[in-house]
Amino acid sequence: MPHARIFPPIIRQFAARVLALTASLVLAASAQAQDASGRKANFGDQHIAVELYAEGAPTEGKEWLLALRFTPSAPEWHGYWSNPGDAGQGMRLTLDLPPDWEVGEARYPVPERLLISDLMNHIYQGSYTVLVPVTPGPSLRSLGPEPIRGHVEFLACTDEICVPQDALLEAKPGGDFARWRAEVAPLLDAGASFAITGQQLRIAIPLPEGMGLAQPHVFVANERLVSYAAAQTFRRIGDVLVAEIPLDQYGTGKAETVAGILAFGNGSGVRFAAGLGSVPTGGEVIAGPVAVQTAPLWTLIFGALFGGLLLNIMPCVFPILSLKAIALARAGESEAKARAEGLAYTAGVVLACLALGAMLLALRAAGEQVGWAFQLQEPGVVVALLVLAAAITVNFAGLFELPAVSMRLGGEPAGAFATGLLAAFVATPCTGPFMAAALGAALLLPVPQALLLFALLGLGLALPFLLLGFVPPLRRMLPRPGAWMERFRRIMAVPMGLTAFALLWLTVQLGGRPFGLIALVLVFGVVVALFIVGKLQRGGKMAWPAFGLVAAPFVAFAAIALPSVYEAKGSEPAESIHGPQAFSSEALEAARASGKPVFLWFTADWCVTCKVNEAAAIERESVRAAFERAGAVTMVGDWTRRDEAITQFLTQQGAAGVPLYLWYAPGATTPEQLPQVLTPELLEAQAAQRDRPSPGTR
């Protein structure tokens, strides 16, 4: 977790504990207990009382159970598991035993999770019992009837304050050991294995396939190994359950063994001890940050295919429509050529989507927090796209000829293939309707199924052109080839030029004005080189070596200057009539705790759909007034630059990219996800319904 998310709550809890400790010391000074050895109980156990019980009489060499029974004085007090989580303190037990007696690892019931200010605590509410196994040694024969004594320290907390507790112990007979045994999580007979891959701990736990798991969660006993508050993903592979847990960013990331408790979600669970070994991949996702396991694969396939098809009419696809229009016009030349170009274009689109999807999955497997459209969060990639858009613009304007996109050279399949590659690369950053669920699922599904969804997304994007290639009646609806095509190409230089200007603006947003200026110098050098190429081409001379000679100095200058002037910008929200807060987990938690509705949206400067929604729906005076009447808190997450916290939150909501719009009703445990195409009327109606019952309301 970033420091900003950890330190403020910890400081608050630390201050509370210091005050509580001071008060407890003063109050306990006159009432300290003392055992025979002179040891004192400094704090007492008035908030959570503790008693020590022994099960019958000990036998040499055989396991003998002691039980610590913790009983809170009021319901608001809770104790902690051995690993308390992000805050708290586990039990520290000292038993007065002969040196030849062995004390085993304490056995706990399945703990509960308590999330406060983004800190995950592992707690027990109400009375609970910890069993401690002891194996007596030969000295048992010479011992008298003296009872077992000891000392225990622990922490008693409410949601607002923590108080140190301790007690002097003396074992007494009795206790309900049969019930306490049943409450303790049993140890798995079969061994588990674990592996650390990138920034993720993966644990394979043998568990019968038919065993139901309501809400599984792994409590890891190793401290500072995993992120306790992070979402856990569970996959079922036959009789093996695989848990995937993000590592603690500030932990060691290493372990020789991993132990813990697998909670089933109904108060029961099992203990496990895992050794380093192989962990199977794939499997069916049965639980995780999003409930994609409930969506049948066929619905995800439909979502990917139809979502890709709708990208052809989404605003974020407009920059590449000029390329498509020229290719579609050429498709009417002959039956064979139309089919060849349709297949080549489809191959280019599908291959680009597969490549982007495979790279996304590989980066996430390596621990990188990236999402769909991650390529446009990289300044170097945006500069390369800027140069490419400028080159295509001057090509359309007739300054030079490039065989891959030239109409004069007959439109070979290689040109359609290159057009398909570019179309997918530029068109896919924004997620449209139907795509969100499919791409969100692809981040959690096994790799083969995830790649299938990416391929179907590409197929949907290419489908109109593919149909034109194979359905003659559709081609006959297009204008016949002729001189108009050259004029059309020059007209299409305008939208491509606008695309280049948009990319230049994005370059400035990503890296600052000096960064954008250097990129503009690079574009100027490339355009000058292409102008010279065009003059040589028209003179029938060898052209491309001249391009290298002219462009090389500009490329070398940019390669040196761009990294030196790059300015990593912050993520402050853009100007808005709503005056939104910048997204963070703490800010969202505080806004939801205020009892007001919360409207949270995620956007990016490179997402045309986001900007259209903001201009057409969000940034409207009528919407602002409706939000004010509802008392709604507005919050925005800017994903223009890579932001791990936003990426992780998007994944938890089942979204692979932006836009994402969430509405938190007062008291609701889960948000309502709004459509990806907004209208002012929809937002006004949402604000007007702030008092309606929510299915996720506590």
Image (cartoon, rainbow, N blue to C red):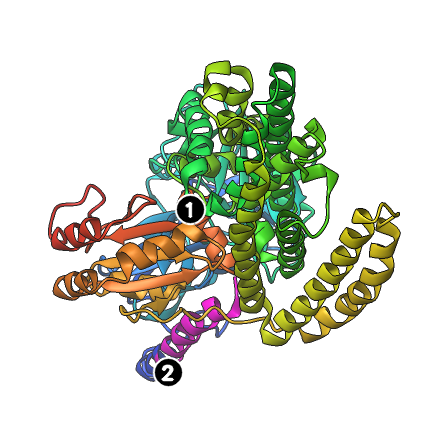
Q: Which tag is nearer the camera, tag 1 or tag 2?
A: 1
Q: Secondary structure at mark 1?
A: helix
Name which residue lies at 36% across and 76% down: 16
177 lies above or below 516: above
Contact, CB < 8 Å: mark 1 with mark 2? no
Give the image location of residue 415, x and y in percent: 68, 34
Q: Which mark is residue 20?
A: none
For badge 1, the amino acid type reads Pro
The residue sitting at 61% across, 29% down in the picture is 345
Q: Is residue 310 above or below residue 170?
A: above
Q: Residue at x 74, y 38 (%)?
A: 403
Q: Position of residue 257 (x, y in %)?
A: 65, 44
SS of the residue under disc 2: helix
Residue under pointer 1: 315
Near-viewer residue (337 or 228): 337
Residue designated by label 2:
22
Q: Main secondary structure of the magenta part?
A: helix
Circle 1 packing at 10 Å, graded few (<14), some (14-19), many (20+), is: some
* Mark 2 nearby-residue class (10 Å; few <14, some 14–19, many ≥20): few
Q: Mark 2 belongs to which amino acid? A: Thr
Q: Position of residue 409 (x, y in %)?
A: 72, 33
In this view, the residue in front, 524 or 519, is: 524
Residue 162 seen anywhere in this rendered image of the structure? yes
- Is residue 7 highlighted in magenta? yes
Q: Nearer the viewer, residue 303 or 589?
A: 303
Which portion, as a residue range, is magenta? 1-19
| Residue 73: quarter of image | bottom left
Residue 520 x, y percent position in the rendering? 65, 67
The CA span between labels 1 and 2 is 63 Å
Q: Earlier in the sequence, mark 1 or mark 2?
A: 2
* Residue in the image at 61% along x and 73% along y: 567
Residue 136 visible within the image: no
